[in-house]
Amino acid sequence: MKKNYTSTLSLWWTAIIVLFTGTLQSQIIANGTYKILSSVHNEVMTCATTAPHDANMAAPVATDNFQLWVFTHQGNDVYKIVNQGNGLTLGINDGWCGNFGDAKANFENTAENVAFKIIPGNDAGKVVIQIGFTTCNFGSVNNPIKAFDIQDGASGAQIQTFETFTTSPNQQFQIVTPAFLSTLTSNANVGLNVFYNPNSGLNITHNQKDLGALSIKIFDMTGKLIKIENFKSSQNTSVTVNMDEFAKGIYAVQITENEVVQKTQKIAIH
């Protein structure tokens, strides 16, 4: 059964991964190939390799094309989404777009019921994927409008449709480039803290020892390296990097200490 979305939800750290274009047609995601990431279990949406090609959540695998989705803008906030692994279009099984409908990539691009709306989620940078059509079979009704939902919020769960709750972590996804996701695969030094302060910039501190020689790399949301800042070994437990030239958005910060990658973390500049 589905969770009771009226209960108190856990606070989720915010990230803005969607590629905003700001066009007059409300195209908030540029046409391209992405992974659909959920922070519930840090899993991405994938497609089963055999029929009926259910859409499920799974741990990210860099070489798995079934975890890649090609977004093509259809106008306004509507997209078609094709799985790169099998070339089939994402849709709702048998046109059932009521509660508990199954999302599958087993449709042709010209089929009905393969259009989806992308709307902002409650958390900054996260989106909700809604059903963009109203023609439903078997008496199914897309009213109120349904959205993709991680079934029971479980690891590896199937993607089903349910009434839209933009505050639910099970319905909020981040549309990320594979390159950006690959920047987040390093170890995490628990004593090393990375945070952004709009008044002082990017702050790196260690709560257990003085910092060694640091190399700080900052990537944008396409995975492009846009800044490197180096610090010699010192007797300090903290350093600060000026971020005034950066636009608002999400970035990945990779911290290397004494030539060993210690931590990679997403930060939001606001």
Image: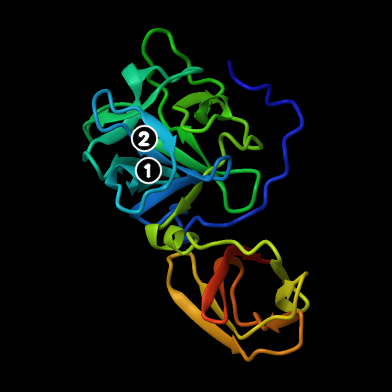
Residue tagged 2: 115
Q: Determine which residue is flagged by label 1.
A: 79
The quadrant the N terminus occupies is: top right
Q: Reading the chain from its start, which is encountered first: label 1 or label 2?
A: 1
Please say if 225 is above or below 24. below
- Distance from disc 1 to disc 2, alpha carbons, whole Å, reads 6 Å
Seen from the viewer's position, the closer of residues 219 and 6 is 219
Q: Position of residue 8 (x, y in %)?
A: 77, 32
Kind of residue at disc 2: Ala
User: Are circles 1 and 2 on residues that touch, CB within 8 Å?
Assistant: yes
Q: Nearer the viewer, residue 63 or 5?
A: 63
Count of marks, rendered view: 2
> Does the image show residue 253?
no
Q: Position of residue 84 (x, y in %)?
A: 26, 45
Q: Picture coordinates of residue 51 (x, y %)?
A: 24, 24
- According to the image, what is the colour scheme of the structure? rainbow
**Is 85 or 256 nearer to us in this picture?**
256
Mark 2 closeness class: few <14, some 14–19, many ≥20 residues within 10 Å: many
Q: Taking 224 as reference, is 217 left or right?
A: right
Residue 231 locus on image (x, y percent): 62, 89
Q: Residue at x 63, y 52 (%)?
A: 124
Tag 2 secondary structure: loop
